[in-house]
Image (cartoon, rainbow, N blue to C red):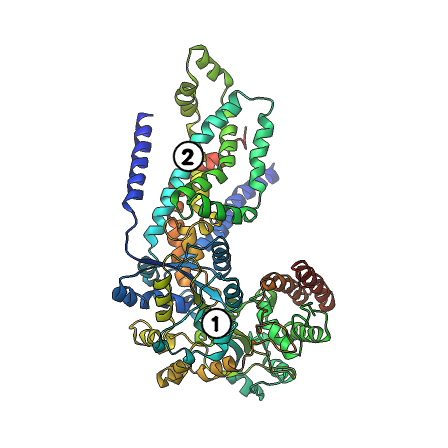
Amino acid sequence: MKYLRNTALGLTLGVTGASFAMADSHATELTIAIVNNGHMINMQSVAEAYTADTGIKLNWVSLEEGVLREQVTSDTATGGGQYDIINIGMQEAPIWGAAGWIEPLEFSPEYDIDDMLPAMRNGLSHEGTLYAAPFYGESSMVMYRKDLTDAAGVTIADNDSWDNVRAAAAAIHDPDAGVYGVCLRGKPGWGDNMAFVTTVVNSFGGAWFDKDMRPTLESDEWKAAINFYVDLLGEFGPPGSEGNSFNEILALYNEGKCGMWIDATIAASFLTVDGVAYAQSPNAGNAVGANWLWAWAMAVPTGSPHSEAAHDFVEWATSKAYVQAVANHPDFGWGSVPTGTRASTYAYPEFQAAAPFAAAEMAAIESAAPEATDMKPYVGVQFAAIPEFPEVGSAVAQEIAAALSGAKSVDEALAAAQSAADNIMSEAGYY
Amino acid sequence: MATVTQHSRFGNALWPVLAWVVALIFFFPIFWMVFTSFKTDADAVKPENLFLFTPTLENYVNMTKDYDYWRFATNSVITSTFATLFALVVGVPAAYAMAFDPSRHTKDVLLWMLSTKMLPAAAVLYPMTFLTKNFLDMYDTRFLVILVLCLINLPIVIWMLFTYFKEIPKEIIEAGKMDGVSTWGEIKDILIPLAWGGIASTALLTFIFCWNEAYWTVRLTTIDAATLSKLIEGNRAPEGLFFGRLSAVSTAAVAPIIILGWFCQKQLVQGLTFGAVK
């Protein structure tokens, strides 16, 4: 017993000692909540130069997308203070800006804000004020195996018709050889299957809500779009598509199992198979909204204890100089620079050479239209920039996945989706 | 007779084979995680590199360089150790009282304690964040993590200890009382030496639960008190296949607990099967 007591005492003292040994230092520190993607991981290395220049220590808190949203939301809603800089998406930026949860951003003339792609700037602003600076942006496009389409004697054009895309998928579909005609997102989630599905609905002339913000999920456009999506993926997609999102399809594509993939433009930088060609997103007569628009951006929460330093860092991390720093970094280069944010990036011949998808990505981003129109009374392409959208989108996503898996018919799924969305919107007081 | 012997021989051969198959199925994900941790992110997703690849320690080097692994690991050790100790300090006397001096409410209290485990953690996330950050100023402190880990494991600790203590004949404790031993003396000199195996296995299981806890440790910390659970969480990526890196981080996070479990497997098995065979 004496031995045990002494061991326990020693352990306690040792651990307590270690705890005190890790006392905080008093240098200026910025705590940055980031989403875990390649560009942000690279930034941690590139920013070592920023720390060396300014003496500001950077603490990176890397989180999975869902957890990041949850934690940043609860931190911001409870008065902030944990983070000096946060990563938020295009869905949150205008809402949080309007609510006063994040600070407006103003930059020095050297920042050249007019170089920022207009679609990104508009999508991250509220009433003309920029609230978050994009560090990486994306749209969606078709990425197809040209070797397979050539062999099958079919073509896929920019802004092609869905009928032609379906015919191309049928022509290259060869499950016996392990190649599926088309791979599309099916995993339920407002940022997963609904990102793609919404673009299909848009391209059929549909929208999430009417002018009174009532859900329109049982409209003819939604029914036509979802029937098309379910049939296309059911006939020419890989089995178990209702479990596939970006990463799952990326793995399938790189294994040579997808003849065609319509997804985020960032995917092009991860593709390792040869002979990939790109085309602008297809549509069913309405090209507006057929390709999505998204950005991960940096914002400064109201209540940040180091607001000035945080603004300085955001300016540096989203500047032209940062793009150059990544391009010149010995571990990275032009193939790793953040895309989808600045027009000047696409003008560099070195970038064009390193990223064969650059022109297609730029065209997709420039054609994306997040503004509210007569057809849709909300901001956003594949989402609506309203606080209730994640809840509405998640509920509808489950129903669409059920239709895809065959658990429900399309009509049943859309009726259930309409009912759920209607409850959420009416409870939120829209009507 | 011959048939019975054949059946018995068949059974003798079958069960070990079945046990091995089940063990291998359970072990395979861990093996694959360790295996993948020595691949680059690019190799980890290439079918041609499924088994044949050039092993690299790149992921482990990057993990310590880019992610400050040791800070997360230190926090895990400190919070799990102290949460376990505190849970035992409260749990041993509580279980002692319930086992040897039960009241008519003891059963209800035990059930009530267990029912607290049924509360969905998400239901109290916002109040917990608000209280610990805005009123108690405890957010992102090791003390908060220790407190939360201790409290969420306390029902299990008390239940396990209660079960062990019930196996000790009450007469032994009563004999101590007759000899004038104080309550503290009964616990220290009689109960703990007799139930040492049970207390040790409870401590080990509690330590493992604390180490693996991910809901609160991810959500109530940012930098200072972040544990290895948060390091793993941060390496999940929605866009991009970083399996090599994720596998290395996961391997480094679970390695200490697997090693601990390996050395203490006798106590663990004893604890898990306690009362199964009488």
Establish if A25 lies above or below B79.
Answer: below
Disc sitting over residue B177 in the figure: none
Are the residues tagged 2 and 1 within 8 Å (C-beta)?
no
User: Residue A185: in sight, yes or no?
Assistant: no
**From the image, which quarter does the N terminus of chain B lie in?**
top right
How far across and down, in percent of the image, does residue A99 sit?
52, 62
Label 2 belongs to which residue? Answer: B86
Specify few, some or many for label 1: CA neighbours under 10 Å numbering under 14, 14-19, or 20 or more: some
How far across and down, in percent of the image, does residue A105 sit?
42, 69
Establish if A155 lies above or below A244.
Answer: below
**In the image: residue B101, left or right of residue B179:** right
The amino acid at mark 2 is: Phe
* B244 and B63: which is toward the camera: B63
Q: Mark 2 falls on what kind of element?
A: helix
* A379 and B14: which is toward the camera: A379
Q: CA distance from mark 2 to mark 1?
A: 51 Å
User: Residue A346: in sight, yes or no?
Assistant: yes
The subunit letter for the residue under badge 2 reads B
Res B44 → quadrant? bottom left
Q: Residue at x 29, y 38 (%)?
A: A14
Q: Residue at x 61, y 65 (%)?
A: A242
How far across and down, in percent of the image, does residue B121 sit?
54, 46
Q: Residue at x 54, y 87 (%)?
A: A150
Q: Mark 1 falls on what kind of element?
A: strand
**In the image: residue B141, left or right of residue B276:** left
**Which label lies toward us, 2 or 1?**
1
Disc sitting over residue A129 in the figure: 1
* B78 and A150: which is toward the camera: B78
Specify few, some or many for label 2: CA neighbours under 10 Å numbering under 14, 14-19, or 20 or more: some
The amino acid at mark 1 is: Thr
How far across and down, in percent of the image, does residue B50 sit?
43, 66
